[in-house]
Image (cartoon, rainbow, N blue to C red):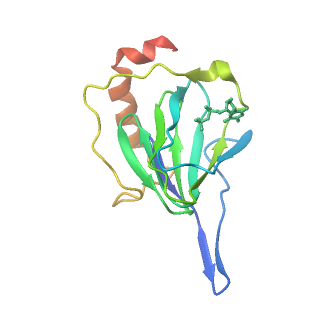
Amino acid sequence: MPQVLTFPRITDPRGSLSFAQDLPFAIKRVYWIFDLSSDAVRGAHAHKQCQRILIAISGSFNAVVDGATFRLSKPWIGLWIKPGEFLDLNDFSGGAACIALASHEYDESDYIRARPTWNNQPSIHAAPPAASRQYADWQYADEWRKEREAMTYFEEWK
Ligand code: TYD
Protein backbone atom coordinates (compact mmCIF):
# COMPACT_ATOMS: atom_id res chain seq x y z
CA MET A 1 0.00 0.00 0.00
CA PRO A 2 1.45 3.39 -0.86
CA GLN A 3 1.56 5.63 2.18
CA VAL A 4 1.07 9.34 2.40
CA LEU A 5 3.79 10.99 4.49
CA THR A 6 3.23 14.41 5.98
CA PHE A 7 6.48 16.33 6.36
CA PRO A 8 6.99 19.17 8.82
CA ARG A 9 5.94 22.50 7.36
CA ILE A 10 7.40 25.67 8.75
CA THR A 11 5.72 28.83 7.55
CA ASP A 12 6.67 32.38 8.42
CA PRO A 13 6.22 35.69 6.61
CA ARG A 14 9.07 34.77 4.25
CA GLY A 15 7.38 31.61 3.01
CA SER A 16 7.36 27.93 3.86
CA LEU A 17 9.99 25.25 4.42
CA SER A 18 9.58 21.50 4.61
CA PHE A 19 12.17 18.81 5.20
CA ALA A 20 12.50 15.05 5.26
CA GLN A 21 14.55 13.17 7.83
CA ASP A 22 14.33 9.80 9.59
CA LEU A 23 12.83 8.37 6.44
CA PRO A 24 11.79 4.70 6.27
CA PHE A 25 14.81 3.97 4.04
CA ALA A 26 18.22 5.47 3.34
CA ILE A 27 18.27 7.71 0.28
CA LYS A 28 20.72 6.53 -2.39
CA ARG A 29 19.45 8.69 -5.24
CA VAL A 30 17.35 11.78 -5.86
CA TYR A 31 15.83 12.54 -9.24
CA TRP A 32 13.28 15.03 -10.46
CA ILE A 33 11.05 15.53 -13.47
CA PHE A 34 10.00 18.90 -14.85
CA ASP A 35 9.07 20.62 -18.15
CA LEU A 36 6.13 18.24 -18.29
CA SER A 37 3.34 18.64 -20.79
CA SER A 38 -0.17 18.13 -19.45
CA ASP A 39 -0.66 14.99 -21.55
CA ALA A 40 2.68 13.42 -20.58
CA VAL A 41 2.58 9.94 -19.11
CA ARG A 42 5.56 9.00 -16.99
CA GLY A 43 6.45 6.06 -14.83
CA ALA A 44 4.50 3.06 -16.12
CA HIS A 45 6.61 0.65 -14.10
CA ALA A 46 7.14 -0.92 -10.72
CA HIS A 47 10.47 -1.72 -9.09
CA LYS A 48 11.71 -5.02 -7.76
CA GLN A 49 13.59 -3.44 -4.84
CA CYS A 50 13.67 0.32 -5.14
CA GLN A 51 11.39 2.34 -2.87
CA ARG A 52 10.55 5.92 -3.71
CA ILE A 53 8.99 8.90 -2.05
CA LEU A 54 7.43 11.31 -4.54
CA ILE A 55 6.82 14.95 -3.74
CA ALA A 56 5.00 17.50 -5.90
CA ILE A 57 7.54 20.21 -5.33
CA SER A 58 5.58 22.51 -7.67
CA GLY A 59 2.21 22.30 -9.37
CA SER A 60 0.19 19.10 -9.25
CA PHE A 61 -0.19 15.72 -10.95
CA ASN A 62 -1.73 12.30 -10.48
CA ALA A 63 0.28 9.43 -9.06
CA VAL A 64 -1.69 6.30 -9.89
CA VAL A 65 -0.46 3.38 -7.80
CA ASP A 66 -1.92 0.00 -8.66
CA GLY A 67 -4.96 1.85 -9.96
CA ALA A 68 -5.45 4.12 -6.92
CA THR A 69 -5.14 7.79 -7.84
CA PHE A 70 -3.38 10.19 -5.50
CA ARG A 71 -3.48 13.82 -6.59
CA LEU A 72 -0.18 15.26 -5.38
CA SER A 73 -0.22 19.02 -5.07
CA LYS A 74 1.33 19.92 -1.72
CA PRO A 75 5.10 20.25 -1.28
CA TRP A 76 4.87 18.99 2.32
CA ILE A 77 3.21 15.70 1.31
CA GLY A 78 5.16 12.67 0.12
CA LEU A 79 3.86 9.46 -1.39
CA TRP A 80 5.90 6.44 -0.36
CA ILE A 81 5.83 3.78 -3.06
CA LYS A 82 7.06 0.31 -2.21
CA PRO A 83 8.63 -2.43 -4.34
CA GLY A 84 6.11 -4.06 -6.64
CA GLU A 85 3.69 -1.14 -6.66
CA PHE A 86 2.97 -0.12 -10.23
CA LEU A 87 3.18 3.64 -10.72
CA ASP A 88 1.81 5.88 -13.46
CA LEU A 89 2.19 9.65 -13.37
CA ASN A 90 -0.17 11.77 -15.46
CA ASP A 91 -2.40 14.86 -15.64
CA PHE A 92 0.40 17.34 -14.92
CA SER A 93 -0.56 20.93 -14.20
CA GLY A 94 1.38 23.82 -15.69
CA GLY A 95 4.73 24.20 -13.95
CA ALA A 96 4.49 20.79 -12.29
CA ALA A 97 7.68 19.29 -10.95
CA CYS A 98 8.14 16.05 -9.02
CA ILE A 99 11.10 15.15 -6.88
CA ALA A 100 11.72 11.51 -6.03
CA LEU A 101 13.78 10.22 -3.11
CA ALA A 102 14.91 6.71 -3.95
CA SER A 103 16.35 3.87 -1.89
CA HIS A 104 18.54 2.53 -4.70
CA GLU A 105 20.76 3.82 -7.45
CA TYR A 106 19.46 3.73 -11.00
CA ASP A 107 19.36 0.16 -12.30
CA GLU A 108 17.40 -0.74 -15.40
CA SER A 109 17.23 -4.39 -14.29
CA ASP A 110 15.23 -3.32 -11.23
CA TYR A 111 12.33 -2.16 -13.44
CA ILE A 112 9.13 -4.18 -13.87
CA ARG A 113 7.31 -2.93 -16.94
CA ALA A 114 4.68 -5.66 -17.19
CA ARG A 115 1.46 -3.95 -16.20
CA PRO A 116 -0.47 -6.02 -13.66
CA THR A 117 -4.17 -6.59 -14.16
CA TRP A 118 -6.03 -5.91 -10.99
CA ASN A 119 -9.37 -7.51 -10.27
CA ASN A 120 -10.28 -5.41 -7.28
CA GLN A 121 -8.74 -2.03 -7.74
CA PRO A 122 -8.85 0.27 -4.75
CA SER A 123 -11.02 3.34 -4.91
CA ILE A 124 -9.83 6.80 -5.87
CA HIS A 125 -8.05 8.72 -3.11
CA ALA A 126 -7.16 12.36 -2.90
CA ALA A 127 -3.92 13.21 -1.16
CA PRO A 128 -3.89 13.65 1.72
CA PRO A 129 -6.73 11.30 2.68
CA ALA A 130 -8.96 12.19 5.61
CA ALA A 131 -6.69 10.41 8.06
CA SER A 132 -3.25 11.38 6.90
CA ARG A 133 -1.10 8.26 6.86
CA GLN A 134 2.13 8.40 8.77
CA TYR A 135 5.21 6.17 8.71
CA ALA A 136 3.90 3.99 11.49
CA ASP A 137 0.72 2.98 9.72
CA TRP A 138 1.96 -0.56 9.29
CA GLN A 139 -1.31 -2.31 9.89
CA TYR A 140 -2.87 -0.66 6.86
CA ALA A 141 0.22 -1.49 4.82
CA ASP A 142 0.04 -5.13 5.90
CA GLU A 143 -3.57 -5.46 4.80
CA TRP A 144 -2.66 -4.16 1.37
CA ARG A 145 0.36 -6.44 1.18
CA LYS A 146 -1.66 -9.53 2.09
CA GLU A 147 -4.22 -8.69 -0.55
CA ARG A 148 -1.56 -8.24 -3.18
CA GLU A 149 0.44 -11.30 -2.18
CA ALA A 150 -2.55 -13.39 -3.15
CA MET A 151 -2.15 -12.17 -6.71
CA THR A 152 -0.02 -14.12 -9.12
CA TYR A 153 1.73 -11.03 -10.49
CA PHE A 154 4.09 -11.05 -7.56
CA GLU A 155 5.35 -14.51 -8.42
CA GLU A 156 7.17 -12.92 -11.36
CA TRP A 157 9.95 -11.47 -9.31
CA LYS A 158 9.75 -12.86 -5.76
P1 TYD B 1 12.24 6.73 -16.78
O1 TYD B 1 12.46 5.77 -15.67
O2 TYD B 1 11.53 6.23 -18.00
O3 TYD B 1 11.46 8.02 -16.23
P2 TYD B 1 9.94 8.10 -15.67
O4 TYD B 1 9.78 6.96 -14.71
O5 TYD B 1 9.86 9.44 -15.02
O6 TYD B 1 9.01 8.00 -16.82
O7 TYD B 1 13.64 7.34 -17.19
C1 TYD B 1 13.81 8.19 -18.30
C2 TYD B 1 15.26 8.11 -18.74
O8 TYD B 1 16.13 8.61 -17.73
C3 TYD B 1 15.71 6.71 -19.04
O9 TYD B 1 16.54 6.75 -20.16
C4 TYD B 1 16.50 6.30 -17.83
C5 TYD B 1 17.06 7.61 -17.33
N1 TYD B 1 17.23 7.69 -15.87
C6 TYD B 1 18.49 7.73 -15.33
O10 TYD B 1 19.51 7.70 -16.05
N2 TYD B 1 18.62 7.84 -13.97
C7 TYD B 1 17.55 7.88 -13.16
O11 TYD B 1 17.71 7.98 -11.92
C8 TYD B 1 16.23 7.82 -13.72
C9 TYD B 1 15.00 7.86 -12.87
C10 TYD B 1 16.12 7.72 -15.10
Q: Quadrant of the N terminus?
A: top left
Residue 11, horizontal then vertical, whole percent = 61, 79
Q: Is 11 located above or below residue 45 in the figure?
A: below
Residue 91, horizontal then vertical, whole percent = 44, 49
Q: Based on the displayed image, in which of its 4 quarters is residue 116 positioned?
A: top left
Residue at horizontal 70 percent and vertical 24 percent from the top: 107
Q: Based on the displayed image, in which of its 4 quarters is residue 20 positioned?
A: bottom right
Q: Is 117 located above or below residue 126 in the figure?
A: above
Q: Is residue 1 visible?
A: no
Q: Is residue 70 visible?
A: yes
Of residues 72 and 104, the one drawn nearer to the viewer in this rendering: 72
Q: Is 158 located above or below residue 131 in the figure?
A: above
Residue at horizontal 58 percent and vertical 46 percent from the top: 53
Residue at horizontal 67 percent and vertical 47 percent from the top: 32
Q: Based on the displayed image, in which of its 4 quarters is residue 155 positioned?
A: top left
Residue 86, horizontal then vertical, whole percent = 46, 31
On screen, residue 77 versus residue 149, left or right, reads right
Indicate which quadrant contains ligand 1: top right
Residue at horizontal 41 percent and vertical 56 percent from the top: 127
Q: Is 98 located above or below residue 40 in the figure?
A: below
Most extreme residue toward the bottom is: 13
In this rendering, the count of numbered labels is 0
On screen, residue 156 versus residue 10, left or right, reads left
Residue 141, horizontal then vertical, whole percent = 41, 39
